Image (cartoon, rainbow, N blue to C red):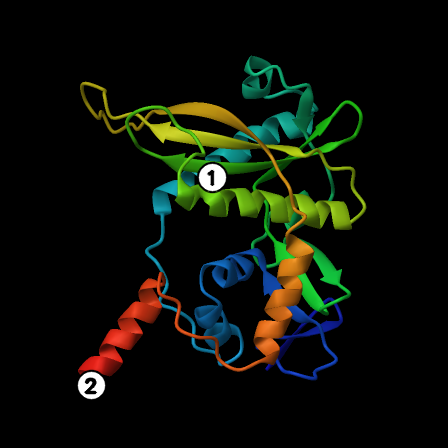
Amino acid sequence: MSDYYRGRRTTALYEPGSPYPFKLSRSRIEKFMNCPRCFYIDRRLGLDTPPGFPFSLNSAVDKLLKKEFDIHRAKGTKHPLQENYGIDAIPMAHELIDEWRNAFHGVQYLHPETNFLIFGGIDDVWQDKNGKLIIVDYKSTSKDGEISLDAEWQDSYKRQMEIYQWLFSKNGYDVSKTGYFVYCNGMTDKEAFDAKLEFNIKLIPYEGDYSWIDETLVEIKNCLEGSTPEFTPDCDYCTYNTAMKTLS
């Protein structure tokens, strides 16, 4: 199984011994981090885990934020959020910005040690006065209390940011270690809905460390070259499949 993108042939499922690059998305790397067995069954055997429910409201917030930042990108001006938080940067104007934000293309890098074509679609990238790039990711939720990045399940958000930073760095850009999450929290304390959902927006800085990525890619390569990994106790899918085999 293969596809063609700009004259570069890549394999859709991993084929041991293939000379063609293996296209590996940021989300597939995250799947490996969560469960090597599910990752192997997906990328080697072609059986993906069931998809989750689409977060349509989150997608709507992302789209509106991009439109809002694009207004300032076109003008070369700061967004009010950048002004309020004292960030000396503007949304980066670049001919590839739409390509970088495309989930099926994104920012790409061919990792020579593994022959993996790594890619990921960003939400935004800002640029400071010295030309350094700041990676930005949009998140939205609705919860009481202060928004933070302290929950264990949010480690995936941090890895996501670090992969984007790594990709831009590998493409020769000067990337700031500090990225930002534009976190939108839906307000539920209003007296009435009035066909309008309002948000509190918080800018959360995060200092990334992507030193783990190269080693992890080698681990993924070894995983795909081997046999099916063992059952992962913390994986809901592995637990379900094992239970079903027991019942049958």
Query: What residue does disc 2 label?
Result: 248
Residue 4 shows up from this direction? yes
| Towards the viewer: 37 or 185 | 37
Residue 54 rendering spot, x and y as whole percentages: 36, 53
Q: Quadrant of the C terminus?
A: bottom left
Q: In the image, what residue occupies the spot 49% across and 43% down? A: 157
Residue 61 rendering spot, x and y as whole percentages: 42, 37
Q: In the image, what residue occupies the spot 60% across and 67% down? A: 220
Query: What residue does disc 1 label?
Result: 62
Residue 15 rendering spot, x and y as whole percentages: 62, 82
Residue 25, by quadrant, is bottom right
Label 1 element class: helix
Q: Quadrant of the N terminus?
A: bottom right
Residue 6 to residue 137: above or below: below
Q: In the image, what residue occupies the spot 77% across and 49% down? A: 171
Image disc number at residue 220: none
Residue 192, by quadrant, is top left
Instruction: Identify residue type, mark 2.
Output: Ser
Mark 2 or mark 1, which is nearer the start of the sequence? Answer: 1
Other residues around mark 2 within 10 Å, as few (<14) / some (14–19) / many (≥20): few
From mark 1 to mark 2, how far is it between C-alphas? Answer: 44 Å
Residue 221 rendering spot, x and y as whole percentages: 64, 71
Label 2 element class: loop
Q: In the image, what residue occupies the spot 61% across and 64% down? A: 24
Instruction: Identify residue type, mark 1.
Output: Asp
